[in-house]
C-alpha cells in the first residue's frame, strides 16, 4: 500500500524521534533569557533549548501564544508549545488547555497533551488532586495510566534543586525524576528562565520519554513561571 505524503512525513518524524530518544536516559532543558522581559517585565513567548546528557542540542522549543493571553493569564495561561529538531522540522507539539490553578477546584485541574508527530496524541499529563502535594498521572495515547509524578510539599527553588519523582503506578518504586536546577541567586531573582533535568530509564518507551518532556514544561509553568509582579508559586496553591 502506498503512503500519502502526509503519512510519509509522519513516519519520518516518528523515526527521528525514535533515533533521538531510544539511546538516552537524561534530557536537559534550558530556558533562554529574554532581554525585553527582564528590562520591562512584559511577558514574551518562552523559548528553550533541549539537550542530551552531553550538552548537545537535539531540539528547540518555542511557545506559541498571543500577547493578551501571556500577560492576562500569566503562568496559568493555555499554550501551544512547538518542539523543533535541528533540521527545523516540528516533531512534538504540546497543548495545554485553560484549567483551574488551585487545588480547591478538583474538577478542573491542570493537564497537557503531547503530540508526536504534531496532530497525533501519544500521551497526557494529568494533575491529580491532593491537598498539599503536587501530583500528576502520566497516561498513554489511550488515556491509560502508566506512571505517577510526585513533588515536594513546598516547591521553592532556594539554593538547591527541586525534585519531582517519577514513580510506578503504586508509587512504591522511583524510576526517574524531573529536577528544577538552581541557577544562582541573580538569575533566580531577576528572571524566570529556568533549567531542568529529566532522568528516566533507558528502555522507557520513546513515546513516554516525549510525554516526560511535556510533564517538565507543565511543571515549569505551574510552579516556576512568573509574570510581571506575580511571584513564584509554592506548593499546589
Image (spheres, rainbow, N blue to C red):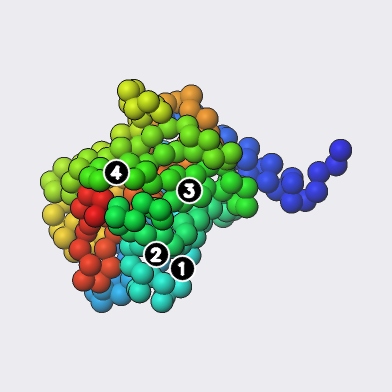
Classify mark 4: residues with Cα within 10 Å, few (<14), some (14-19) or many (20+).
few
Mark toward the start of the polypeptide (3 vs 2): 3
Instruction: State the separation of the CA atoms marked 3 and 4.
Output: 33 Å
Residue located beneath label 3 in the image: 59
Residue at (48% x, 41% y) in the render: 211
Residue located beneath label 1 in the image: 65
Instruction: State the separation of the CA atoms marked 3 and 1.
Output: 19 Å
Instruction: State the separation of the CA atoms marked 2 and 1.
Output: 9 Å
Residue at (33% x, 62% y) in the render: 75
Assign a secondary structure to mark 3. Answer: strand
Mark toward the start of the polypeptide (2 vs 1): 1
Q: Position of residue 205 (x, y in %)?
A: 52, 30
Residue located beneath label 4 in the image: 130
User: Can you see residue 148?
Assistant: yes
Instruction: State the separation of the CA atoms marked 2 and 4.
Output: 22 Å
Mark toward the start of the polypeptide (3 vs 1): 3
Amino acid at each position: 500500500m502506498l503512503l500519502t505524503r502526509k503519512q510519509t512525513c509522519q513516519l519520518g518524524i516518528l523515526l527521528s524521534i525514535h533515533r533521538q530518544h531510544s539511546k538516552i536516559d537524561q534530557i536537559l532543558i534550558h530556558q533562554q533569557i529574554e532581554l525585553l522581559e527582564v528590562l520591562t517585565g512584559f511577558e514574551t513567548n518562552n523559548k528553550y533549548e533541549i539537550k542530551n546528557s552531553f550538552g548537545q542540542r537535539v531540539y528547540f522549543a518555542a511557545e506559541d501564544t498571543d500577547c493578551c493571553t501571556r500577560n492576562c493569564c500569566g503562568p496559568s495561561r493555555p499554550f501551544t508549545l512547538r518542539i523543533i529538531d535541528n533540521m527545523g522540522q516540528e516533531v512534538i507539539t504540546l497543548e495545554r488547555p485553560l484549567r483551574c490553578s488551585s487545588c480547591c477546584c478538583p474538577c478542573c485541574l491542570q493537564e497537557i497533551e503531547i503530540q508526536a508527530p504534531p496532530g497525533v496524541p501519544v500521551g497526557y499529563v494529568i494533575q491529580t488532586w491532593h491537598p498539599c502535594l503536587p501530583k500528576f498521572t502520566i497516561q498513554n495515547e489511550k488515556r491509560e495510566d502508566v506512571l505517577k509524578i510526585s513533588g515536594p510539599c513546598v516547591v521553592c527553588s532556594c539554593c538547591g534543586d527541586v525534585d519531582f519523582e517519577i514513580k510506578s503506578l503504586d508509587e512504591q518504586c522511583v524510576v526517574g525524576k524531573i529536577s528544577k536546577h538552581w541557577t544562582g541567586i541573580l538569575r533566580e531573582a531577576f528572571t524566570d528562565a529556568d533549567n531542568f533535568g529529566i532522568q528516566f530509564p533507558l528502555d522507557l518507551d520513546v513515546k513516554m520519554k516525549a510525554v516526560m518532556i511535556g510533564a517538565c514544561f507543565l511543571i515549569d509553568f505551574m510552579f516556576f513561571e512568573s509574570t510581571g509582579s506575580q511571584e513564584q508559586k509554592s506548593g499546589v496553591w
